């Protein structure tokens, strides 16, 4: 007797069922939820107030810097170099850890299910995109506020939004490279770019008596400044969603383990384990197995037993 295909859960259905089951078993009251929300809002307000005050006075502190006899790089250029360094570090980190990965629980419970992998991994893609957007906002805001002329609120908003959209486009491109197993070159290239960005201004400022070049924003209309990144972000995310079902379960499991070890090492300040987690390359599965002959439920049971038997030592 064949199962009814309409009763099968999709990837989104599996994630929704998991959330409902977790919520039903969670012993959490409305008072606890309200306290958590209030704590999160308070933390966000404090962070925004602290960083907002620091960024608001950034231009005044740069302008009030005393004259020195040695070569000094402009504050705008320094902020741009720092932004490139942070961006390169985030891109290299995402390429090392995924960007899409599967936690041990996801690898154990979700990946073996017959549901579409695209729907199962869509939540992970959203999380990575959110992390990239937050990093882009943190990087872009100081650069915009360090401009020689005080930008208006629309200019700051559009520039930061454009940076966030470009971050989403980069995430989409990294996922496409991950699906093809071609992310190995990303970290070395970003590291080399960061080195060049640091060395060239330092050497130029040392050799040249007075650094006259100051980076300035291109004269681009605001709609175009946000329209092009929006198109790139949509195209990148759609491409990432389409190729997410090609991500191998073994690679997702190994990257998820690396993320888990790196997170634990960062919290415990264990730099040795953190370096091992970030430096260990993710190897693809040794061989690909074809299960095209599996058509019936009993064949799936036999295939599962054969897979377990072949993987047992």
Image (tube, rainbow, N blue to C red):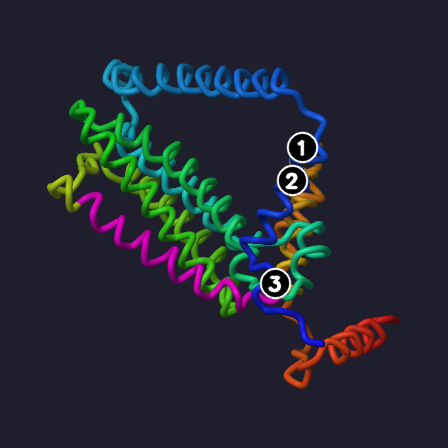
- Whether 246 is drawn above or below 91: the answer is below
Picture coordinates of residue 95, whole percent (x, y)? 51, 55
For discs 1 and 3, the disc positioned in front in the rendered view: 3
Does residue 123 sit above or below 211 in this rendering?
below
Mark 2 and mark 1: span between their CA atoms? 6 Å
Judge from the rendering whether residue 49 lies leftward or rightward of residue 211; answer left or right. right
Q: How many marks?
A: 3
- Mark 2 secondary-structure assignment: helix
Is residue 203 inside the magenta stretch?
Answer: no
Residue 31 lies, with reference to residue 313, above or below; the image says above
Asked if the residues shown at circle 2 and circle 1 are in contact, with their CB atoms under 8 angstroms apart, the answer is yes
Instruction: Tell me the quarter of the picture where residue 121 sits.
Output: bottom right
Residue holding disc 1? 267
The earlier-in-sequence mark between 1 and 3 is 3
Which residue carries the number 3 mark?
A: 8
Crowding around mark 3 (Cα neighbors within 10 Å: few <14, some 14 to 19, many 20+) is few
Cα–Cα span, label 1 and label 3: 40 Å
Residue 263 image label: 2
- Earlier in the chain: of badge 2 and badge 3, it is 3
Q: Residues within 10 Å of mark 1 (few under 14, many from 20)?
A: few
Chain part drawn in magenta: 225-248
């Amino acid at each position: 007797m064949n199962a009814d295909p309409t009763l099968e859960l999709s990837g989104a259905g599996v994630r929704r069922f998991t959330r409902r089951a977790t919520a039903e078993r969670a012993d959490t009251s409305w008072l606890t939820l309200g306290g958590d929300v209030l704590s999160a809002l308070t933390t966000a307000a404090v962070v925004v107030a602290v960083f907002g005050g620091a960024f608001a006075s950034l231009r005044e502190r740069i302008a009030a810097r005393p004259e020195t006899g040695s070569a000094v790089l402009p504050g705008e250029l320094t902020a741009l170099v720092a932004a490139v360094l942070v961006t390169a570090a985030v891109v290299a980190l995402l390429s090392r850890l995924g960007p899409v990965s599967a936690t041990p629980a996801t690898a154990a419970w979700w990946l073996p299910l017959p549901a579409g992998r695209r729907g199962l991994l869509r939540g992970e893609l959203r999380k990575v995109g959110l992390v990239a957007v937050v990093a882009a906002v943190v990087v872009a805001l100081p650069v915009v506020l360090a401009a020689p002329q005080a930008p208006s609120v629309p200019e700051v908003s559009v520039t930061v939004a454009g940076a966030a959209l470009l971050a989403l486009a980069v995430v989409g491109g990294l996922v496409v490279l991950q699906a093809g197993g071609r992310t190995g070159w990303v970290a070395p290239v970003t590291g080399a770019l960061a080195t060049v960005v640091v060395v060239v201004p330092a050497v130029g400022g040392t050799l040249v008596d007075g650094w006259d070049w100051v980076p300035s924003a291109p004269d681009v209309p605001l709609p175009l400044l946000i329209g092009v990144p929006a198109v790139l972000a949509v195209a990148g995310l759609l491409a990432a969603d389409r190729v997410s079902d090609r991500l191998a379960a073994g690679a997702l499991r190994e990257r998820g383990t690396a993320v888990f070890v790196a997170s634990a090492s960062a919290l415990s300040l264990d730099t040795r384990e953190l370096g091992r987690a970030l430096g260990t390359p993710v190897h693809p599965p040794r061989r690909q197995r074809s299960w095209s002959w599996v058509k019936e439920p009993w064949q799936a049971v036999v295939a599962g037993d054969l897979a377990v038997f072949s993987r047992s030592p």
